[in-house]
Each structure stands twice: as C-alpha cells, then as structure tokens.
C-alpha cells in the first residue's frame, strides 16, 4: 500500500471494504456449488470395481508388447526401450514385481491398506462333492493381475466373465506343517460356469494376419500394453522388443482349434496324452478315465475305460505314462501311488507304492522308465525304483509342500517347485541339490524346456517367469489374471502353454513370452498336456471336463 499512488491506494482500500461485507452465502453463489462439495469428491478412484471384459473362447490375437501399462512412467518411449522399475509399475500392474502380496488398493478404500493379504500355504485337499479351492486364514482379497481386455462390445454377453471368486485347484490354507486338511470345495463352482460361445466363434481363423508382417516392432510401439519384461540383474524390468520371427517360422503354431470336450463328470485335476497320440487320460475324483481321441468326428466321445484308484472320494492330482505307453502311474490325495498295466486285456493295478506323506501333488518319470519322482505334501521328493517297486531315497529341502516337478530330457537334472516360494534343481547323478531360486510367491507349476536352456515357472501371484538354466537371464510375463496352475513345454522347445484360475490357456514363445494364442474356457483350467508330436493340447478344468485342441501351423 505505501508504495502505491494515492489514487490506487484509495481503490484498494475500497475493494477491501467491499470484500468484508460479502457473506459466505454470497461467496458460494459467486463460486457456484463448489462450496457444498464434500471431501469425498477430492478422492480419485482409478481402480475398476467391475469384472474384466472377456476373452473369447477359441483363440485371440496376441497383444503386442507395447507400453500402455507403463505410459505414466515412460511418457515418451519413441522407438527406444527404457528401463522400468518394479516400483514404477506398481500403480499399473499390482503383480509387476515378484511379491505375491503387493497390491494397489483403491483410493476410496484406504482401509484395505491395513488388511494384509495372507499368502496361501498348502495344496488343496478336495473332498466329496468338492472342487479345489484356495483358502486364507486372514480375510483379504485375492490379488488381481494386470488385465488388458479387448473392447467388451466386440463380444456377445454370453462370453462375459463369470462372477469373481472362483476357486483355483490348490487348497493352500495355512495349517501346521505336515497337516493336510480336507476342505469342501465343490459348491464353490456351482452356478459359475459361463455358457459356451457360439460355434461360429470356435472356428479356425488366423489372429496374427496383421501382426506377422510387423512383429519386429512389437514392444516399442506406443498404444499397446506391455506384458513381457526382461528382468535385469538389478531387479529393473525392461519391455521386451520381440524379434522378427517371434510368431513365424517352423514349429511355431498359428492357431489352436477346439475340437472336442471330454465330459469326465468330476473336476479334472490331471491330464496326459499317449504317444503316439491316440488316448487321453483324465484324472478326477477317485478314477482315471481313458478316451480315444482318434474317433471319427470327436463330437460325442465316450470313455473307453475307467481306472478306479485311490479312495473314491479323493482327487487324483497327477497321471504320468511311461515312455513306452504301457504303464500309467497315478498319484493324488492318498499315501499310495498306483501303477497300472495298460496292455492287459483289461487295465489293472500291478503295484502300489506306499509313501509316508499323506498326498502326492505331482509326478515325473525318468527317460529310461526306471525311476519315478513324486512331489510329496510334506515337502520331500520321493525317488522310486519302478523295477523293484521300492523307495530308494528322498530329496529333502523344501520347507513346505512340493507342488510341481519336471525332469531334463537327458534325465540328469530334476526341477521342483514348492509352497515355500522356492524352485530347486537336483543333480540326479550325485543325488544333491544344485540350485535354489527364491521368489516372493508360492510356486504352483513349472516346466523345463526340452532344449535344456529355459525353466518356466507359474506362480500364485499370476506371473509366469522364464529363467535361464545357467545364466542370470530372466523374463517376467503378465497375461494371466490369477494363479498359474499348470504349465507345459512343447517337445520342440520353441513354445509353451500355461493355464490358470482365470479360465485362460496361454501359449507363449520361448523364452521372451510373445503371445502366440490364447483360449478362454468356462472355468478354472487346472491341468494341461501337449502331445509329443506338438499337434494337440488337452486341458482339464473345474467344470468337470477336459478340452481337446488341435494345433494348426502355417
């Protein structure tokens, strides 16, 4: 004021006097209705409360590995590739890191920040009339993975997601080590199976017509969500620029066509395909059913045999054929493994192997058919001599249930995953542990590439990680939206598939994870297998059936 001219001082003083006379009502009138807004209007909620848009049954085109997911931390990608940290990705992808209990709650639900998500800690033990579920001792939400759905308008309402909350095929409820509760889980699936899509949507088509000609730029273009990341040694993650031949060339599928449903009648927790491709074996509650998929038409396929094993009310968790196809080994919610002679006029049990553990969660067979390895619910890996039908040793290391297993093509190395958040490799010649990989999530599935270079791991937190067997190279893949329940490499090693609680079957390029095709089923996909000739995929699901897909190449 003192520095103003006398004329300006008088104008300012007058304005101040008028301002003192304005009431709050008049002020609100001047400003509109803003004065009546509550504090809640200042809270921004960017979380989607509704269910994600569907992915259609059949196959969908892969999402290019672009940058929508990280657009706020990399606003000007251009043609180059920038480094993204796990922290940067958190607001866009709760599962971009490896932690199984990292999430980004809605701003309107701040109280959820105080509710810890309790990791699941035991494989499921389904009981009569039940389907496998995951339980948690602490109320909390199952973490949701990144979702990159196509426009909802592109699909009919019959293809929309089922209501949220479907149980996955592992009851991993926190219990004391070595205990294995029986949980009623079947009712959880009732009413949740969505209608199957119209037949027109299951017809063969090429989802990659445009992408195959421009795949070299995948991962560097804006406007496309990134889902494949190269994990650097310092933990930072970098979107992967896919090479020119990512979706092309010999041995790379073009599409997968659903050709048959095998109505097992119970939740299908285990599947395997014979070599040569003729029979499919599906494991459910208390029995394995045998199907001839060479039947003409494949429309009304009926089981050609039923193998009753374990206890009738116990689920079968793994079925494995010996390489000659003459013997089937069955393990599950019981202390014994059943060995079946398939060449007799009527299949029969020729031996049972009795374990000290109450359940077997996965099986592997040595290439020479002499040894069987079983993942036990007590964390041990049992080694069985199949010729003498005896337990010869146990690999000890996992501090919680051993959930998955695979063996190298030459039979020299074994890989196991556990609910203790570790993956371990074992030297079968020397009988010792070689490596241990630690994660921040429980391991539900894994597969070792037949070429001997790459290990793919499916986790409870929805991530798929692909690790090099001898180098620090690692990729992290984000297309599943929930637990990754099964995983299988093609015999050629160029691609692999994973399935999950999100009803999805994903096919990935080895090792960097370009999406080859994706199929949507009507319930959680609990198990899968690929035929030795890489021409068929079979999945087992929570809606009591197995699905047969024919793989079509260019």
Image: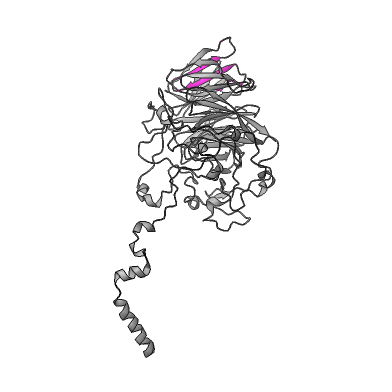
**Residue extending farthest top:** 345
The percent position of residue 118, horizontal first and vertical second, equals 38, 39
Query: Which residue is found at the position 62% from the left and 33% from the top?
Result: 203
- In front of the other: 532 or 376: 532
Span highlighted in magenta in the image? 320-346
In the rendered view, does 491 fall on the left or right side of 236? right
Query: Is 328 covered by the magenta stretch?
Result: yes
Asked if one can make out residue 382 in the rendered structure from this viewpoint, the answer is yes
Identify whether 462 is placed above or below 296.
below
Residue 515 is left or right of residue 9, and the answer is: right
**233 vs 8, nearest the viewer:** 8
Position in image of residue 533 (x %, y %)? 66, 27
Q: Quadrant of residue 15?
A: bottom left
Q: Where's the C terminus, which quadrant?
A: top right
Please say whether residue 327 is one of the residues in the magenta stretch: yes
| Identity of the residue drawn at 51% across and 13% down | 351
Q: Quadrant for the N terminus, please.
A: bottom left
Which quadrant holds residue 164? top left
């Amino acid at each position: 004021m003192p520095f103003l001219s006398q004329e300006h001082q008088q104008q300012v003083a007058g304005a101040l006097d008028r301002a003192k006379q304005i009431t709050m009502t008049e002020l609100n009138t001047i400003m509109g209705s803003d004065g009546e807004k509550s504090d809640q209007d200042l809270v921004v909620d960017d979380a989607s409360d509704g269910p994600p848009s569907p992915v259609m049954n059949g196959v969908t085109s892969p999402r290019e590995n672009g940058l929508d997911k990280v657009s706020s931390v990399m606003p000007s990608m251009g043609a180059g590739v920038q480094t993204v940290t796990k922290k940067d990705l958190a607001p866009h992808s709760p599962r971009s890191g490896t932690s199984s209990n990292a999430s980004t709650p809605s701003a309107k639900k701040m109280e959820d920040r105080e509710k810890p998500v309790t990791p699941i800690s035991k494989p499921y033990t389904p009981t009569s009339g039940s389907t496998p579920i995951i339980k948690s001792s602490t109320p909390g939400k199952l973490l949701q993975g990144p979702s990159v759905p196509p426009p909802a308008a592109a699909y009919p309402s019959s293809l929309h997601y089922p209501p949220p909350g479907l149980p996955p095929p592992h009851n991993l409820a926190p219990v004391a080590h070595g205990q294995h509760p029986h949980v009623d889980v079947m009712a959880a699936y009732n009413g949740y199976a969505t209608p199957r899509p119209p037949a027109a949507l299951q017809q063969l088509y090429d989802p990659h017509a445009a992408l195959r000609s421009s795949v070299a730029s995948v991962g560097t273009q804006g406007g496309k969500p990134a889902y494949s990341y190269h994990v650097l040694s310092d933990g930072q993650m970098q979107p992967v620029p896919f090479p020119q031949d990512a979706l092309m060339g010999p041995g790379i599928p073009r599409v997968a066509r659903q050709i048959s449903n095998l109505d097992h009648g119970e939740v299908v927790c285990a599947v395997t395909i014979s070599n040569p491709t003729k029979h499919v074996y599906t494991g459910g509650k208390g029995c394995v059913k045998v199907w001839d998929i060479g039947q003409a038409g494949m429309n009304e396929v009926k089981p050609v045999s039923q193998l009753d094993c374990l206890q009738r009310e116990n689920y079968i968790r793994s079925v494995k054929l010996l390489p000659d196809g003459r013997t089937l080994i069955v393990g599950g919610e019981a202390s014994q493994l059943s060995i079946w002679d398939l060449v007799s006029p009527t299949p029969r049990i020729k031996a049972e192997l009795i374990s000290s553990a109450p359940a077997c969660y996965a099986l592997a067979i040595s290439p020479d058919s002499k040894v069987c390895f079983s993942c036990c619910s007590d964390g041990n890996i049992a080694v069985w001599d199949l010729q003498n039908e005896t337990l010869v040793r146990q690999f000890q290391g996992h501090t919680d249930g051993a959930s998955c297993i695979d063996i190298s093509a030459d039979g020299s190395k074994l890989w196991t995953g556990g609910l203790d958040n570790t993956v371990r490799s074992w030297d079968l010649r020397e009988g010792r542990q070689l490596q241990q990989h630690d994660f921040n999530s429980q391991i539900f599935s894994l597969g070792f590439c037949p070429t001997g270079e790459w290990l793919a791991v499916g986790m409870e937190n929805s991530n798929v990680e692909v690790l090099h067997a001898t180098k620090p190279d690692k990729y992290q893949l984000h297309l599943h939206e929930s637990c990754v329940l099964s995983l299988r490499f093609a015999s050629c090693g160029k691609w692999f598939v994973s399935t999950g609680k999100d009803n999805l079957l994903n096919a990935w390029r080895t090792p960097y994870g370009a999406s080859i095709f994706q199929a949507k089923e009507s319930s959680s996909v609990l198990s899968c297998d690929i035929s030795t000739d890489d021409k068929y995929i079979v999945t087992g699901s929570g809606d009591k059936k197995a699905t047969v897909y024919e793989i079509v190449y260019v």
